[in-house]
Image: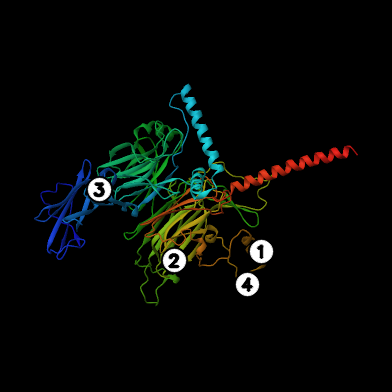
Amino acid sequence: GALRIRARPRRCVAGCALGAFSSPAAYASGGGVDGGRAFWASAKEDRDGLETIVSEVGGEEVARGVAPVSSDDHGPPMAIFPQIFEKAGGGLGARSLAATTAHSLVMVGGSSVNWVRDEALASVRGAIFVDAPRESITATAATVPTFSERLALQLAAATKLGETLSGFLGGVLGEEAQAAKKLANARRYGFDKLAVVANADAGRLFALALHTGDVAWSALAPKGSKLLPGRAGTPDARPEVVVYAATDETTTLRWVDAHDGKTTEELRAAAFDALVPAGVDDPLTKRKAYLGVTLRDDGAALSVLPASAEETLASFANATALHFHVIKDGAVRCFRVASASRADELGSVVVAPGASDEIVDVAYAEDAPVSSKASILGDDSLLLKYLNPHLLVVVTTSAGGEAAPLLDARLRAAGDDADQTEPPTLHVTLVDTVSATVAHRASVPHGGAPAHAAVSENWVLYAYWNHKAKRSEVGSLSLHEGLIERFGLSPFKVPEQAATRSAWTAPPPVALQRTFALAKPVLALSSTRTARGIASKHVLLGVAPGQVAALDRRALDPRRPSLEDDASRKEQKKHERELMEGLRPYTPFVPLLPRQTVSYDKRILGLAEIRAADSGLESTSLLLATGVDVFGCRHAPSGAFDLIADDFSYALLLLLLLGMSFGAYVLKKMAAAKNLSLLWM
């Protein structure tokens, strides 16, 4: 087999890769009769590509060449494995498999490249969705276009109109036309978004086209870097993402064009304890500004990145309260921006107090539109949703084992004389990061990792493994501000409500909680997202052995009724009203039906993360699941109510319209002739 040689021969310079093959009976891929021959290979960066040398140990050189493999795209070589073979015309030949630091595999044969495979896609995370580039007909930077520019614009517009008409008339003929129609629909309805993902271990960025699955571009990045939102796309500016890399000495921010992967700007600063969004945009470049936070005992020192946003941040902080938080050493520390260089600490919430406590997941309130701020109940009353954009969900686990003489009887060990100890416990803490208070806290005895959490509107969902029951469970929390009775809101009666809400004076939310059991372990957790929040919400569950299931959120509603056999008539009527809302009777086990599996029969190996994005249609949400495999699809939680199928026959519709128009014209002529004949009688 192949092996690495640690000793570097004189041919290999610093930064090159070494490999060797030795065979006691034959060459690497057959044909040889001499035994005991060994070969070594080296690879290094060259101005024109990747230089490889294959030689026999103590013998002649077998192959040498420079293959057109750019280290700017695939990284420098890390290892090389030669393969020796006998040529048909006699003599030895060689090809080599090179592995790069950016997790690319390249098979080269002398000066040619046989194939390239990007294995860095096998571990991408943190997708950021941006709109795909659009073809637009615009003038130059001049305020008023010249006469020649106006002619060029009119010619381009006429050409585009002709292409549109020809595509409409011939779009139903042939498979190639159908494919072109699907591509046109993807662009029209916003299905062609780009998902920018990163592999921190390989130091690699990729942009994936969601409608085709193709890699739009790839670029190198510092190892250990993370992706952050940079700038939303506008008619005047292209969308950007920020590559954030931190070491013990420096912090690097690199703005990357999300359409082509080119670096537009790079900024280096001193090391910080944390980097948080500033909540304002740079007035010059319209990029999102960030705050470099250095923690202190009495607050925090701030550095605005980029520095051109300092004045905007200072003026905005004077007019509006800016808050941020930092999770460090098992505590959530909450701050308020006092100036462009200083922040005051408002308080902290300890979420992992014990030495064995561990933070396993963190979830934030999603920045998504909400169509309704209340839920209509079966008796026409309104249940007000608790919508807090500053809500933070922290999931922690504790190993237990501490003495607990007052432990609940249901959790006690068998035997009265047995020492009572705390069982392993999973804690779900809801923190208001403005007031530094706990909005709600739930504890699950015998719960533990793997655990995941997600926030959808006023819902908090968390999945975990129950070590006692040996099964995966999902906890559901719905948060509410209050209730308006059936006749409490009318044209003549309006309840008193404040126009604004303050985190300092608002009461804690009313939390409704239920726990459900699943038949498969949960690997990832998320929820669908649509453009206006009107379509139904589905909970996206990544379950073993690597499938994505979309579960209607009502299946996990904590308000699912449970009716006892001896229930009173009043309770029975309440149960009937709840059933009218679409709530099914409560059962602890939630089945995952095959038609709920949006990944079909495909298995997503190593599924670790699910992200969702909205499209141009309210009915459709775009999904991206990543792990060792990458899977993307479209999902319509409420059905494709605003979308015509790709195979819809526009030609038949046009013929029907023409036929109806011709029929109406013939009937009009017949009616006129009949009226004229009646006048002569």
Q: Label 1 crowding class (10 Å Cα cut-off): few <14, some 14-19, many 20+?
A: few
Mark 4, secondary structure of its residue: loop
Label 2, label 1: how far apart the Cα atoms are:
35 Å
Q: In this view, does 102 lie to the left or right of 322?
A: left
**Quarter holding the C terminus?**
top right
Circles 4 and 3, Cβ within 8 Å, touching? The answer is no
Circles 1 and 4, Cβ within 8 Å, touching? The answer is no
Q: In this view, does 116 lie to the left or right of 511?
A: left
Q: What residue type is labelled 2?
A: Lys
Above or below, comparing residue 21 to residue 198 in the picture = below
The residue tagged 4 is 566
Residue 468 appears at what percent x and percent y? 41, 70
The residue tagged 3 is 112
Residue situated furthest front in the rendering:
89
Decide which of tag 2 and tag 1 comes sooner along the chain: 2
Q: In this view, does 670 lie to the left or right of 278?
A: right
Q: Which of 203 and 504 is in front in this view?
A: 203
Label 3, label 1: how far apart the Cα atoms are:
78 Å
Decide which of tag 2 and tag 3 comes sooner along the chain: 3
Label 4, label 3: how far apart the Cα atoms are:
81 Å
The residue tagged 2 is 520
Q: Which amino acid does label 4 sit on?
A: Asp
Residue situated furthest left in the rendering:
58
Q: Label 3 crowding class (10 Å Cα cut-off): few <14, some 14-19, many 20+?
A: some
Mark 1, secondary structure of its residue: helix
Decide which of tag 3 and tag 1 comes sooner along the chain: 3
Checking the image for residue 2, the label placed there is none
Decide which of tag 1 and tag 4 comes sooner along the chain: 4
